[in-house]
Amino acid sequence: MTATTLEPLAEPRRSRLSIALVFGVHGAVGGTFVTRIPWIQDRLDLSPGQLGLALVMPAIGSSLAMPLAGRFVHRYGGRAAVRGLVSLWCLALTLPALAPSLPTLCAVLLVYGATAGMADVAMNAQGVEIEQRLGRSIMSGLHGMWSTGGLVASGFGILATHLALDARLQLAVTALVLLAIAQPVCHGLPDLRAHEEAEAPPRFALPPRSSLVIGLVGFCAVFGEGASMDWSGVYLKDITGASATVAAASYTAFSLTMAVSRLAGDAVIRRIGAVRATRLGGAVATLGGLLVVAANTPALAIPGFALIGVGVAVIVPLAFAAAGRIGSNPSQAIAGVATVTYTSGLIAPAVIGALAQATSLTVSFGLVTLLAFALLLGAGALRRAEPDFPAGNTPDNTPDSAPDNATAR
């Protein structure tokens, strides 16, 4: 996807808006699913351990599929790859609510995760490429749009839960609506392709050595993010005695804080730098984890999840931005770092479920708190995410003078 020289985008505002909306659609799929996890658990009568086993499957699917994404993007080009993979991700949303048993649920979540992971790599590679051609930080804002999409979708999920709407109908309708939105949005993406002489990445891109530490920092952040997304509703219901509607709202609080923090993140990163932003985020996430562990009422747990969202918000965008500056092929480097980072998603549901089964969900979120504190120690690994702006094209003096987050994880 990456050319040997970076040419300016023909339509920078349109490119930026289109990739921001792609992130929003991707986030909306995930936000719709997580609000109905308690419904799926109740319908199949799953124990915490069984639910943890099922929720590990999307991460397995993602981890297996993401290393394939670099070759896919190279072959078909950024725009076609994003359109095809995001469309498959939208359609996969219909599958989990249709599963009649735990084994079937595990199988469909494997497919669900594979499409999610490949689409994630393709759109992040496109985002890094657009960021480098614009010469200004936009990745945090793009991830903010991802969180915004999840937030909006979770609002509909809360309403559906309150109305006792069958999740099979809700997920099917939502999938079709998001698929219809994705088509014109993806059409607006720039068709960034590799030069003919550019070497194709391996069919299965293993993480480069330089990405491992970056991936481990992302690992800690994704653990907290994944645990909060998948288990906050169950935590509110089982530990604090919250109603089903309030339990679903916990994800909304988490998504809201992540969205706001990421939309503001580009300005913060430019002001204090990637390393300090990571350390600040780790401190805030640690405080949020402590509140969750201490919570015995929803009024304490929900702010705790919200602070976890604030704390981890900019870590993953910074990890992808750092990955995109490794080597000459951002899709391959991002695929490698994403594989390491999202291995956390592979581990988190199983670990949370296993610890909850053996002890309690409170103990499980004690581990989340420890990993949040680890962000303070590993922040230096994301120094590579500091953008190298071309001469005369600094963040405060760019050809595109619109505010950094005017259109935009």
Image (cartoon, helix red, strand yellow):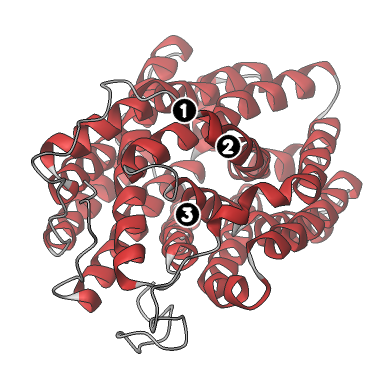
Q: Is residue 357 left or right of residue 222?
A: right
Pointers 1 and 3 in contact (CB under 8 A)? no
Amino acid type for the residue under numbered disc 3? Ala
Q: Residue at x 19, y 66 (%)?
A: 7
Calculate the distance from the C-alpha at mark 2 to the C-alpha at mark 1. Answer: 9 Å
Q: Which residue is mark 2?
A: 215
Rendering quarter of residue 74: top left
Q: For the residue carrying disc 1, how many other residues have a C-alpha within 10 Å: few (<14), some (14-19), or many (20+)?
A: some
- Secondary structure of residue under mark 2: helix
Q: Which residue is mark 1?
A: 207
What x and y, as percent, mark residue 193?
14, 49
Q: Which residue is mark 3?
A: 321
Q: Which mark is residue 199?
A: none
What x and y, as percent, mark residue 388?
47, 66
Calculate the distance from the C-alpha at mark 1 to the C-alpha at mark 3. Answer: 15 Å
Residue sitting farthest toward the top = 103
- Secondary structure of residue under mark 3: helix
Q: Is residue 300 left or right of residue 330?
A: right
Q: Residue at x 58, y 75 (%)?
A: 270
Q: Which mark is first along the chain, 1 or 2?
A: 1
Tally of numbered discs: 3
Pointers 2 and 1 in contact (CB under 8 A)? yes
Q: Residue at x 26, y 45 (%)?
A: 175
Amino acid type for the residue under numbered disc 2? Gly
Amino acid type for the residue under numbered disc 1? Pro
Q: Which mark is first along the chain, 3 or 2?
A: 2
Calculate the distance from the C-alpha at mark 2 to the C-alpha at mark 3. Answer: 12 Å
Q: Is residue 399 left or right of residue 46?
A: left
